[in-house]
Amino acid sequence: MGLRGGGCVSVILWSVAVAFAGSTGARLPVTTSSALARKHFEKGMQALEYLRRAEAVEDLRTAVTADPNFAQALILISHLSQDPAEQQETRTRAQRLAPRVSSSEQLLIRWLGEVQEDNYVPAIAAMNDLLARYPRDKRLLFLAGRWLVHQERYSQGIVILERAVALDADYPAALNELGYAYAYSGDFEKGIAAMERYVDLEPDQPNPHDSYGEILRLGGRFGAALEQYRLSIRADPNFGSELGIADTLALMGKEPEAREEYERAIVFVSSESERVEYELQEAVTWIRENNRKQAEHALKDVGKHAHGAGLGVLEAESHRYLVMYEPDYKAAMKQLQAAQACLEEGHEISRSERRDEQARILRVRAERAAESQDGDAAAAAVKELLEMAQNSRSQVVQVSYHAAAGAVLLEQGKAGEAIPHLEEDAANPESLRRLWKAYTVTGAQTEARSVAGKLAELNIPTVEQALVVPPFRESLVSHAGQP
């Protein structure tokens, strides 16, 4: 996963670094009429800093119960909740109450609210204005850095998180996010150093071990990763690090053991959304075993569960996984139609989540159509993605367009034209495989070897990795053994 996206966003974000140098400020104000609400708000924010998301949301809900006009708590619930209906309801209430709070809190509401409504330019402008007002508010820096990391904008996230650590070298929440940002941007040395510091600061908390385990797994150090996940479970058996163990075992090829751990992990979920996400991960283990019958059965069951829970995006995702695994083009296109229908059947879905999943569906449509020599369908999907990319700064939309355009150009025999597009999605296994092919075809052997090494060492527990990386590794071994 790398930093990608349109120039407009990059220019806006650059102003953040400039603003830090010349601005002063204390902390973002918190407007509430209730002492009890303020107490639970602070408790919730501390829970978020400990990466206890479910507890954070519950405390914020309690704060809103104590003060129904608590706009800042409402927008943070909308930001953190995994319930689409709750996201919509609390966002609307926060926006309605915005005129009653400070201008700085209005900026927070605009930032987090506009993001969910897929209005990234005004959202990021509001975030930047807020950071310029409070350059020494380490919690605000953590929130902004965390959001950027989740948006896969690691370089910008690092700038902000490093500022938080400069203010407080022992700020665990910022060190955690900084470790992820370093590791996912390719700097494992700094990523591991940040996580080791995080563990040293809070050795008795579960999340430092859980996060460190994830970074170790990303680097292929599976045994050490499992050790950290088990330390997390020892610190708090209810934290849920069984998921980390399950994902690690899946990447190691121990699929039956992984399924057992996913079942253990599901016990600790805090929402139906989280339960469905875990079920999707478990279903992918059948893909890793190339057990088509079980994979299809599991993914269809996940889709039914998501539908019953009103989780349209996750239902669409289960169909999209089936498309990616389905060898027959016509059958795959039917599944894509089903995925599209999930986004249109009235489920409560934020505009940004709907658009992102729509982009993923179009990407898969373009890739499958290009591979099946259905030029018209491929071109139509790329055209629609281009229009979306021109009107959205979403990272998902941007990379989906480039991935689809690169895939289509490569199938058309235009490897040289495909390369710059595929380079914009240089963290996705499918795009990396195509980029390796494009470099090979054009004679860029040094670049091809570099990409091959990166792809072979990619240890992320996703369906794309399951479909691409294991067979690619086998092909490298087979090729190396040839005389």
Image: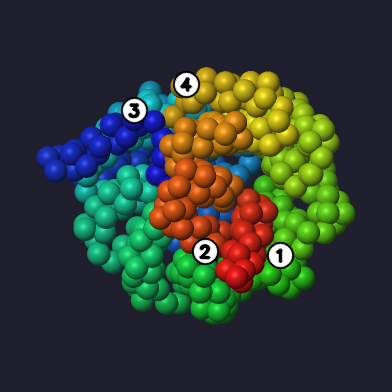
Q: CA distance from mark 4 to mark 3?
A: 11 Å
Q: Earlier in the sequence, mark 2 or mark 3?
A: 3
The residue that disc 4 covers is: 391
Specify the amino acid type for callout 1: Tyr
Q: CA distance from mark 2 to mark 1?
A: 24 Å
- x then y, percent, for residue 263: 75, 65
Check disc 1 and report its element: helix, strand or loop: helix
Q: Earlier in the sequence, mark 2 or mark 4?
A: 4
- Point out which mark residue 457 bears: 2
Q: CA distance from mark 2 to mark 4?
A: 35 Å
Q: As rendered, which of 34 and 307 lies closer to the eye?
A: 307
Q: Is residue 335 above or below residue 224?
A: above
**What colouring method underlies this structural image?**
rainbow
- Point out which mark residue 8 bears: 3
Q: Are marks 4 and 1 in contact (CB under 8 Å)?
A: no
Which residue is at 77% across, 63% downward?
Answer: 289
Residue 117 visible? The answer is yes
Left or right: 287 as drawn, with respect to 348: right
Which residue is at 51% across, 74% downward?
Answer: 221
Q: Are marks 2 and 1 in contact (CB under 8 Å)?
A: no
Closest to the camera, between mark 2 and mark 4, is 2
